Image (cartoon, helix red, strand yellow):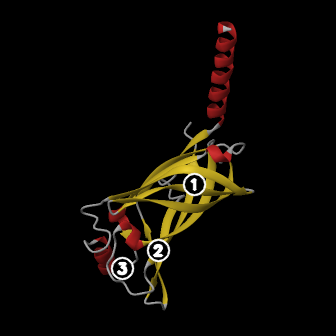
Amino acid sequence: MKARLAALAAVMTVTVLSTSAMAADFVVDTKNVHASINFRIKHLGFSWLTGRFDKFSGNFSFDDKNPDASKVKIEIDTTSVNTNMAERDKHVRGGDLLDVDMFPTAVFESTSVKSSGPDKATIVGNLTLHGVTKEITIEAERVGGGADPWGGYREGFTGTTKFALADFGIVRDLGPSAKDVELTLNIEGVRPK
């Protein structure tokens, strides 16, 4: 009986190790600007105000044979918010919006990934923004993956999500049309050699 249990444990260990070894780890390629985090929010209900975060970092694991085992973590430098207007950026960084002096970093970390079609997945995870952590859902799509011209291997994804600013304690009145922000993440990762 002990021999059977030991053999079963060995098989399970090998299975777990081989499964985890199949998932590859990637570093988000921000060095060469092959990734972006963009946002948009309505301005007075007349148009979209768009912007981005210029500084962020992250990593993810991905196995195309088992995409549901994927994981992702992204850290955003909120002081790098850029709406293409210096005076507005100063306002967005201020105490009644992002309050970057108090909360200089936002973090998203996945808790589950569920395939929703070919090269599509729903990613659920925790976003910490403005000192508040809430669960959000990102609808993601694999753009592609493969060898690059420099001898490396890359995977690329895009994802979108929408959430209420008030959910993260940002309650400044920006008008009735500016309650929600939409994020688009374009993430290209390179597998470390």
Task: Identify whether 10 is placed above or below 84.
Answer: above
Question: Circle 1 sits on which residue?
Answer: 188
Which of pointers 2 and 1 lies earlier in the amino acid sequence? 2
Residue at horizontal 68 percent and vertical 7 percent from the top? 3
Where is residue 172? Give x, y as percent. 31, 79
Where is residue 146? Give x, y as percent. 69, 47
Report the quarter where the C terminus lies. top right
- Report the amino acid beneath label 2: Val
Quarter of the image where one finds residue 14? top right
Task: Identify whether 18 is placed above or below 27.
Answer: above
- Report the amino acid beneath label 1: Glu
Q: In this view, does 89 lie to the left or right of 144?
A: left
- Nearest to viewer (mark 2 / mark 1): 2
Which of pointers 3 and 1 lies earlier in the amino acid sequence? 3
Q: Residues within 10 Å of mark 1 (few under 14, many from 20)?
A: many
Mark 3 to mark 2 CA distance (whole Å): 18 Å
- Report the amino acid beneath label 3: Met
**Secondary structure found at label 3:** loop
Mark 3 to mark 1 CA distance (whole Å): 27 Å
**Secondary structure found at label 1:** strand
Where is residue 136? Give x, y as percent. 50, 61
Q: Is residue 102 left or right of residue 185?
A: left
- Nearest to viewer (mark 3 / mark 2): 2
Q: In this view, does 153 lie to the left or right of 117?
A: left
Mark 2 to mark 1 CA distance (whole Å): 23 Å
Where is residue 51? Give x, y as percent. 44, 74
Quarter of the image where one finds residue 80? bottom left
Question: Circle 2 sits on which residue?
Answer: 181
Residue at horizontal 63 percent and vertical 38 percent from the top? 23
Task: Identify whether 170 is placed above or below 46.
Answer: above
Question: Circle 3 sits on which residue?
Answer: 85
